[in-house]
Image (spheres, grey):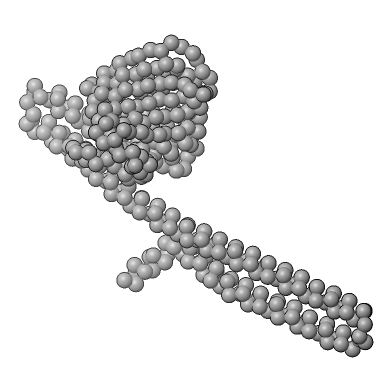
Amino acid sequence: MWQRLLRALGRNIDVIAFAASLITVGPLMAWWSVLVRRNIITMDYLWRAQLDHLPEGPEKLAQLAAVKQQTDLHLLMISGESATAACLLFILAVALFMVARHRRSEARRMQTMLQLTTHQLKTPIAGMRTLLQSLENGSIPQAMQREFLNRGVVECDRLEHLVETILAYQRAVVREPEMQPRPTDALVGQILSHRQALYAGEVVAWTTRSPSMIRCDPDAFQVVFENLLDNARKYGGDKVELIESVEAETWRLKVADHGQGFDPARTERLFEPFERGGGAGVAHGSGLGLFIARQLMRRMGGELRATSDGVGRGATFTMEMPVSQSSATPSTEVAHG
């Protein structure tokens, strides 16, 4: 018990020191205020005692009024200084509370992330081990080896995607995005072509009304876009619709599916870390995807929004970025998959 208490004190030594300083400074400020007020009142008494020896008349009344005015001014000043000091102490106390709460929240987030990612890492690793052992033992028929190898590639992709998600989480918190001008049709098309080789059954209908030039971090853009496509595949089925447009110097890419959707009242909760959909048959996912996607979009100067007409009526996620250089081209529709 004592060791646990000492470890907790060691982890929060800076917060404890700050709190101890506030607790010490508060009484000292109060004592200083009382002492200064007492000195002001004492000086007022001494000045009035000296003026008592003067004969009654206009001059004495004028000096008494001056003493009273000066005393009132000093008392007002010390009252203002005391009130200001009290407000500062209150603000510092609130800031200390918020820092401590944020630290506890981040510690819980990190612990949850480690638990979830560890669990997600174990599943594909176990699958790969079983596959390799089966191949080594020769227990997989020759006709089925290609199918099992393809499953192994899928598990490797899951591992790679999880590692990219963890790295993106760190990037969203620490590193500044490396902004570069890129054409949207090339960005989107390259990612779709890559996914077509991985997920043969995924069908993406891409409608581009006005391909544009935007400034973005290509790696961050890929993480955001692939997270949205993964969500659409997990919760919305294999058919995904992409609608690209430009309105008021803002480039938009809508990723729409016709799956389970969500309650509109839960829209903002979808972007909280470790918030995962509760659809039947969906058990994997770290719950960091949409949180990271929105953080990366905002750090690139864009925004990520979500809309749905309700449970069972599909969902639409919209990426928004300011246009760097518009290119007016006719609408085209491309089907991938």
Residue drawn at 42 percent across, 16 percent down: 209
Say if 135 sits above or below 66 in the image: above
The quarter in which the N terminus is drawn is: bottom left
Is residue 223 in view from this perspective?
A: no
Residue drawn at 34 percent across, 72 percent down: 2
Q: Is residue 259 left or right of residue 34?
A: left
Residue drawn at 6 percent across, 26 percent down: 141
Q: Is residue 253 left or right of residue 133?
A: right
The x, y position of residue 12, in whole percent, is 44, 63
Residue drawn at 76 percent across, 70 percent down: 73
The x, y position of residue 23, in whole percent, is 53, 71
Farthest front residue in view: 57
Q: Is residue 28 left or right of residue 316?
A: right
The x, y position of residue 265, in whole percent, is 34, 42
The quarter in which the C terminus is drawn is: top left
Is residue 38 in view from this perspective?
A: yes
Q: Nearer the viewer, residue 150 or 137?
A: 150
- The part of the image, by quadrant, that contains residue 69 is bottom right
Farthest bottom residue in view: 53
Q: Nearer the viewer, residue 46 or 139?
A: 46
Q: Nearer the viewer, residue 58 or 27?
A: 58
- The part of the image, by quadrant, that contains residue 49 is bottom right
The x, y position of residue 77, in whole percent, is 72, 68
